[in-house]
């Protein structure tokens, strides 16, 4: 009998571990192959372009108007989420006060502005995920903070650093055109603004564009339908902090079983008459164990504690084992070993494989422990490596399937292909619904231009979409040739961290440093050289060898561009492994002082 305890399993199964690993690998391959599809990322439709009614802002002030702003400024930051706010705070810390923040949302917060679905919370410890805790003096209530609290913290940052006067909300970028003689970006917006900025910083976020599966008949559905990032409490009742009280007589379906869905399903299970969960690929769900933050502990921390805790977490989830694991939660215990890395020897490769298998076995065993019906438990089991999709942590999701009103509709890796006026059709069965929720995710690894929603025009009228037609060309993921003073704040050709805040904190400090150095040294414009872009890509590909092999064996997801094998997917990569490697590259580049790998034009018009 298999016995599961928090992160290990024991088994009396006579099969050898090596045989079980081989068996699992064969199943991983079969499950991946079932899901690979030629249309890869194109299987999704963009909300704004195809289904405009899905993309309205439920939170914005209706009828909002303002006078257009016409001004010259030092910096325009696109995006008012963590990245935009941290960039602004970084600029302020370097004495640069002349900037604008443009965001289509009605407030700061980015993903935490949009995502207010029931059960929404952060899956990274709030003590390291919420920015600027020491600066604002804010102590999070829970180890994993609810979304509402994170959104309020974003507003707190906005007030604390007096960012609101800089913000142009409910405003979308229309055009951004580089004016070579003036060495500035000329920007127009949906509200008639005309901004002239020395630097344009794109901090659009990775969860900025919600996507829908392009399912036949999707717009024929006669009931209510919306994406999780546009939750309609007017229909469901309740609010982000109160239970939904208008679903007791409703049949609700939810398409998708990713990190969002596992938070929503338990809430729907409590509120709705019937819940149908349409699954293409199950999530791996570990123990959450949320608890209140100890205020006395918080008050006793020495200055610099948050940076130290963040670095410790990053190291603990990057294959290193810090002497003391400060966060010590499920993420650090399941991800302590980076099993994607390139192994030096066959023995090391086998060790990494075994470690990955054991982690996933423990998560599969947990399902048998929690879910009563063995057939349902079997369908909920994830058959892929631990880095293939974001690991989830929740204590109510799996248990929800023990409720009589919750039904798992497994599509055997095929997904929902058809929706009629009554509801989704799977295996010839039409599921009649009142509400259909799309937990179908966001454009994370599509082209940057598509996600930004505008197409910067650089030198000689060349659009970014043209220069990057075959994927990104950058130095550090930040500077790009032909687009002077465009600073990209994203995670294309850059780093990545499970704690996205840690990544953004470092990257935005880098951006602020470039702007400040330009101002101090009379630099008119800066862009990467083509040679430096090529060298950076070569470095990324070398560093990513192990990752590429691992990722190719994975079931499709946004992590591997839905299995696409295109040049753009190959170029739009990140430095895998420890985020500190990427941070080290930025730091060393700044330390050199003379901006290597760039074309710099100074005020006296001498090219260096
Ligand atoms: P995901 O992209 O992770 O999940 C989308 C889901 O929709 C997948 O289960 C996908 O299946 C499914 N799907 C797509 N098309 C179909 C179809 N035709 N039929 C059935 N199912 C379909 O999006 P999420 O919103 O869940 O998460 C996105 C990211 O947001 C996370 O990875 C995480 O980074 C972040 N997030 C963070 C949270 C936090 O606490 N910090 C909380 C929630 C989200 P398949 O897997 O087969 O592609």
Image (spheres, helix red, strand yellow):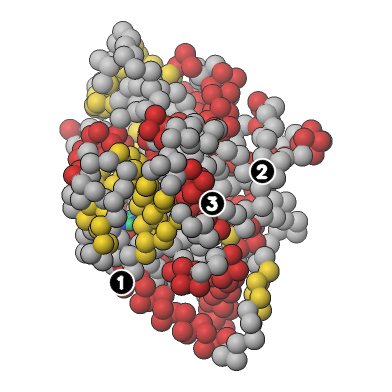
- The quarter of the rendered structure image containing the N terminus is bottom right
Instruction: Tell which residue pokes out farthest to the top in this image.
Output: 67
Mark 2 or 3, nearer chain start: 2
Mark 1 or 2, nearer chain start: 1
At mark 1, the secondary structure is helix
At mark 2, the secondary structure is loop
Q: Alpha-carbon neighbours of circle 2 within 10 Å: few (<14), some, or many (≥20)?
A: many
- What residue is pinned by disc 3? 498
- Which numbered dot is residue 34? 1
Vertical position of residue 385 compared to residue 487: above or below: below
Percent across and percent down for residue 440 are 35, 49
Mark 1 or 3, nearer chain start: 1
Q: Nearer the viewer, residue 223 or 81?
A: 223
Vertical position of residue 565 compared to residue 309: above or below: below
Dividing the picture into quadrants, the one containing residue 408 is bottom left
- Which numbered dot is residue 143? 2
- The quarter of the rendered structure image containing the C terminus is top left
Rounded to the nearest whole Å, what is the CA distance between mark 1 and mark 2?
38 Å
Instruction: Tell which residue pokes out farthest to the front in this image.
Output: 249
70 left or right, relative to 508: left
Q: Nearer the viewer, residue 591 or 90?
A: 90
Percent across and percent down for residue 446 are 30, 49
Q: Nearer the viewer, residue 465 or 525?
A: 465
Vertical position of residue 546 compared to residue 132: above or below: below
Q: Alpha-carbon neighbours of circle 3 within 10 Å: few (<14), some, or many (≥20)?
A: some
220 left or right, relative to 140: left
Percent across and percent down for residue 97 are 50, 17
The answer to whether residue 242 of the structure is visible from this angle is yes
At mark 3, the secondary structure is loop
Rounded to the nearest whole Å, what is the CA distance between mark 1 and mark 3?
28 Å
Q: Nearer the viewer, mark 1 or mark 3?
A: 1
């Amino acid at each position: 009998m298999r016995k599961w305890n928090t992160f290990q399993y024991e088994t009396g199964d006579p099969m050898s571990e090596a045989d079980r690993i081989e068996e699992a690998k064969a199943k991983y391959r079969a499950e991946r192959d079932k899901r690979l599809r030629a249309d890869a990322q194109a299987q999704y439709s963009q909300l704004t372009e195809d289904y405009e009614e899905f993309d309205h802002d439920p939170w914005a002030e209706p009828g909002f108007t303002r006078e257009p702003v016409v001004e010259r400024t030092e910096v325009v930051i696109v995006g008012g989420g963590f990245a935009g706010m941290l960039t602004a705070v970084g600029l302020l810390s370097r004495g640069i006060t002349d900037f604008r923040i443009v965001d289509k949302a009605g407030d700061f917060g980015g993903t935490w502005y949009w995502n207010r679905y029931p059960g929404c919370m952060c899956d990274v410890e709030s003590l390291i995920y919420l920015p600027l805790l020491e600066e604002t003096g804010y102590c999070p209530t829970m180890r994993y903070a609810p979304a509402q609290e994170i959104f309020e913290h974003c507003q707190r940052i906005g007030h604390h650093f007096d960012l609101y006067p800089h913000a142009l909300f409910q405003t979308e970028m229309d055009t951004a055109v580089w004016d070579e003689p003036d060495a500035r970006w000329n920007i127009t917006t949906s509200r008639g603004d005309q901004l002239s900025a020395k630097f344009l910083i794109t901090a659009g976020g990775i969860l900025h564009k919600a996507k829908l599966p392009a399912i036949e008949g999707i717009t024929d559905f006669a009931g209510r339908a919306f994406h999780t990032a546009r939750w309609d409490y007017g229909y469901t009742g309740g609010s982000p902090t109160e239970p939904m009280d208008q679903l007791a007589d409703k049949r609700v379906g939810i398409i998708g079983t990713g990190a969002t869905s596992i938070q929503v399903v338990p809430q729907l299970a409590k509120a709705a008459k019937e819940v149908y969960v349409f699954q293409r690929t199950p999530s791996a769900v570990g123990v959450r164990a949320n608890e209140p933050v100890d205020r006395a502990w918080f008050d006793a921390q020495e200055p610099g504690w948050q940076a130290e805790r963040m670095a410790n977490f990053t190291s603990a989830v990057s294959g290193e084992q810090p002497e003391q694991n400060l966060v010590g939660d499920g993420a650090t215990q399941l991800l302590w070993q980076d099993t994607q890395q390139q192994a030096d020897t066959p023995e090391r490769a086998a060790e990494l494989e075994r470690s990955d298998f054991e982690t996933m076995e423990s998560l599969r065993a947990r399902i048998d422990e929690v879910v009563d019906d063995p057939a349902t438990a079997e369908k909920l089991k994830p058959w892929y490596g631990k880095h293939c999709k974001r690991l989830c942590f929740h204590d109510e999701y799996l248990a929800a399937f023990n409720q009589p009103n919750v039904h798992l509709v497994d599509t055997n890796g095929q997904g929902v292909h058809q929706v009629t006026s009554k509801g989704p059709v799977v295996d010839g069965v039409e599921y009649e619904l009142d509400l259909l929720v799309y937990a179908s995710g966001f454009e994370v690894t599509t082209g940057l231009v598509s996600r930004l929603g505008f197409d910067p025009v650089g030198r000689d009228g060349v659009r970014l979409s043209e220069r990057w037609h075959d994927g990104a060309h950058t130095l550090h993921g930040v500077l790009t040739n032909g687009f002077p003073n465009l600073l990209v704040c994203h995670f294309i050709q850059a780093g990545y961290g499970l704690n996205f805040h840690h990544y953004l904190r470092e990257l935005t400090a880098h951006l602020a440093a470039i702007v400040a150095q330009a101002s101090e040294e009379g630099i008119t414009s800066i862009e990467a050289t083509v040679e430096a872009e090529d060298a950076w890509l070569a470095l990324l590909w070398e560093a990513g060898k192990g990752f590429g092999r691992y990722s190719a064996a994975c079931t499709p997801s946004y992590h591997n561009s839905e299995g696409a094998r295109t040049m753009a997917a190959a170029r739009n990569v990140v430095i895998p492994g420890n985020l500190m490697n990427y941070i080290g590259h930025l730091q060393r580049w700044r330390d050199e002082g003379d901006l290597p790998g760039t074309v710099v034009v100074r005020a006296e018009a001498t090219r260096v």
